[in-house]
Amino acid sequence: MSEKNERKKIAFYIGSLRKGGAERVFVNLADYFQSEGYRVVMVTQYQKEEEYDLPDGIVRILSDIEEEKVSASRAVNFFKRLNKLHVIWKEQKPDLVLSCIGKNNFMAVVTAMGTKTKAVVSVVGEAKEEYPSKGMRMLADVLFSCAAGIVLQTERSRSFFCGKVGKKAVILPNSLNPAFIRPRYAGAREKKIVSVGRMDANKNHEMQLRAFAALKDKYPEYSLVIYGDGELRSHIEETAAALGLAERVLLPGVVQDVAVRIERASLFLLTSYSEGVSNALIEALALGLPVIATDVPSGGTEELMEDGVNGLVIPAGDQEALERAMDRLLGDPVYADGLGREAAKMQERLAPERVNPMWKSYFEGILDK
């Protein structure tokens, strides 16, 4: 590694490191840049329980204001947070900061002003949800135009922003979690339908339950296993019981060895109303699972899948389409296996050694300006 690169310092700014897709991407990128000789600092507003661990050598700083300094005024607290983040950039002197998710991007751009730190913003979810109001969209257009770089994950996202932002933005994919890089399982598949994701309204696990209930007598040997946890867990349990599926719907919670748990399954479901580019979907495809996924507004599914080639894509919220797709794949294992074989090519497409250098090249282009 050159002396020039060793002097460079990159900061990552995100709300917390709780176990989610964007957080994992940030931890993986931080690890990569440190391995490439960069100095790395991770700045989070909060520290939560059940977070991803940072690799040794990466400094973590909390940007939230201390409890004793919290004011009764939300506006005062907002400006205190802005000031603290600005001070962090001045003291840490990162050459570049990468931020993501909603208002964090605004904070990064504003607080980097007046420093030598170049702010790069990234939109990892559905842009309309991250910036839902007209005012937020206008602010995004203004502040993103001032950023040193803009990273989007899908081509559909460009149309959400003004032309200047869209032209300035680049599309950079997320690299595959190394835990999911392995030979595709080639044996007899378990009679399991699996799903991985937080149990909230957006993931629409209830549609999975109702579609499974419609097919339960035709495929009596199958079970539905949903990995994850969340505020709707009890509702999912109650719905499963009401549909006569109490013994056939399993909720193991959050597990560490997801790849091992799901790689032999017969079918993977992603039924979200909205996603960015789903890491859970990337991982299921990489394992070579037969996959059914909803076409989310961001274009995240479209970026990863071609209907009938490496999986089946259905409209979001369409239970009948899900039933038909499940019936087709469960009823024709040979066809399902063909989709899975094609899906496994995701391992090569999003391998870390291929994707991470794209991020490095983009960052270095900004730093060298």
Image (cartoon, rainbow, N blue to C red):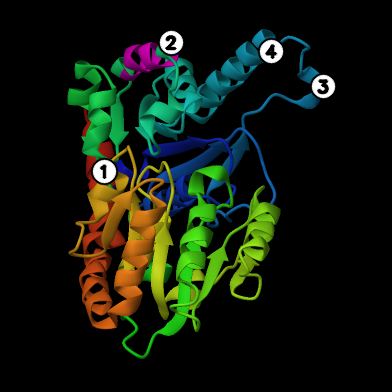
Mark 3 or mark 2, which has the lower sequence index?
3
What is the three-letter code of the residue carrying label 1?
Leu
Residue numbers of the magenta segment: 135-144
Which quadrant holds residue 333? Answer: bottom left
Residue 104 spot, x, y in % from top left: 49, 27
Dominant secondary structure (helix, strand or loop) of the stretch shown in magenta:
helix
Q: How many marks?
A: 4
- Image quadrant in which you'd find residue 283: bottom left
- Helix, strand or loop at mark 2: helix
Which of the two discs, 3 and 4, labels the residue nearer the N terminus? Answer: 3
Of mark 3 and mark 1, the one earlier in the sequence is: 3
Q: Distance between the Cα atoms at labels 1 and 2? A: 27 Å
Q: Earlier in the sequence, mark 4 or mark 2?
A: 4
Residue 174 visible, this orientation: no
Looking at the rendered structure, which numbered label has been put on residue 74?
Answer: 4
Q: CA distance from mark 4 to mark 2?
A: 19 Å
Dot 4 or dot 1, earlier in sequence:
4
Query: Do tag 4 and tag 1 residues touch (Cβ < 8 Å)?
Result: no
Location of mark 3 (residue): 68
Residue in the picture at 27% in, 73% down: 340
In the foreground, 227 or 323: 323
Q: Which residue is mark 1?
A: 172
SS at badge 3: helix
Q: Position of residue 257 (x, y in %)?
A: 53, 72
Taking 188 as reference, is 317 above or below it?
A: above
Residue 135 image label: 2
